[in-house]
Image: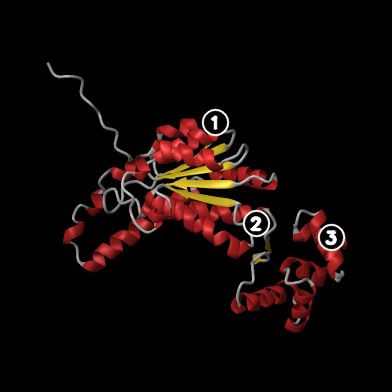
Amino acid sequence: MSGPEVVRVVAPTERRNPASYDLDLLPTREVLQLINDADQTVPGVVAGVLDAVEAAVDLAVEALRAGRRVHYFGAGTSGRVGVVDAAELPPTFGSPVDWFCPHLAGGRDAMWGAVEDAEDDVAAGAEEARSCVRPFDLVVGLAASGRTPYVLGALRASAALGARTALVAADPDAAAQADVDLFIGLDTGPEVVTGSTRMKAASAQKLVLHAFSTTVMVRLGRVYSNLMIDMSATNAKLRGRMISILVEATGCPAADCTRALTAADGDLKTALVSLVSGAAVPEARAALARSQQQVRDALALLA
């Protein structure tokens, strides 16, 4: 007598896409068109989870204002998307390098190539979390399948430490959603190449993370209008851009902006408040301190 039938649950990202059954028979241009057609569905999927992304932004802002941190835990392409997002924030927004902390299964070597079995190591994810996560941090798991052991191990250990947890997955029905405070389930469906989550699933994760982290920076006062005002001038190009931003933001001549930036010791935000309000640099700096570095609030104090 045979035993009970084992039913394997297939994640959406592992199913075959009927639109690409003949992918290997198509002319090059048609392969490209098919991929592009599939890619165009991704922004709509992301639009459907914006309420959940908003909640994640609120948790991140709360954590960072309290001196805590945001962590990304991922494996493979998902983890690399997290590394790229976190790495771009300090030069773009002048944020402290430890605000957003990416963790990749397999460590640094996995950024450049596959590290066999790293994503299957639930204990490694838990150990990594225990080494760096603190109570009230926000820990975001990135897993296209929604069930990557390394990621789930990190999330469970983080929750036990008193951190808030979120999971971004390309399976809206992922069982692990019951184990986190916040679930962002992206219904990207089957890939053009079956199981290749470097395609639509990764694109969706990139859109979610870039929208999430950028909005966090906006809420923390690191953008004025639509201008970067906390960027770090690490080379001549960026120093020139700082002057351009001041000219755009204030309408003042470049020479006046240069003098204000020099007087503010290179602090673009202080120079901006000084120029717009007409206040001296020390007054502008003090107003920013009183307003939690929010330019519009600082200007209101000086009005």
Please tell me the numbered disc located at residue 202: none
Mark 2: few/some/many CA within 10 Å (<14, 14-19, 20+): some
Mark toward the viewer: 3 or 2: 3
In contact (CB < 8 Å): disc 2 and disc 1? no
Q: In terms of secondary structure, where does tag 2 sit?
A: helix
Left or right of 6 in this view: 56: right
How far is the residue under mark 2 from the one under mark 1? 30 Å
Give the residue at x 39% y 55%: 109
The label nearer to you, 2 versus 1, is 1
> Residue 104: image x %, image y %?
44, 49
* 226 lies above or below 202: below
Mark number displayed over residue 160: 1
Would residue 204 be visible to someone looking at this image? no
Specify the amino acid type for callout 2: Val
First in sequence: mark 2 vs mark 1: 1
Disc 1 residue type (three-letter): Ala
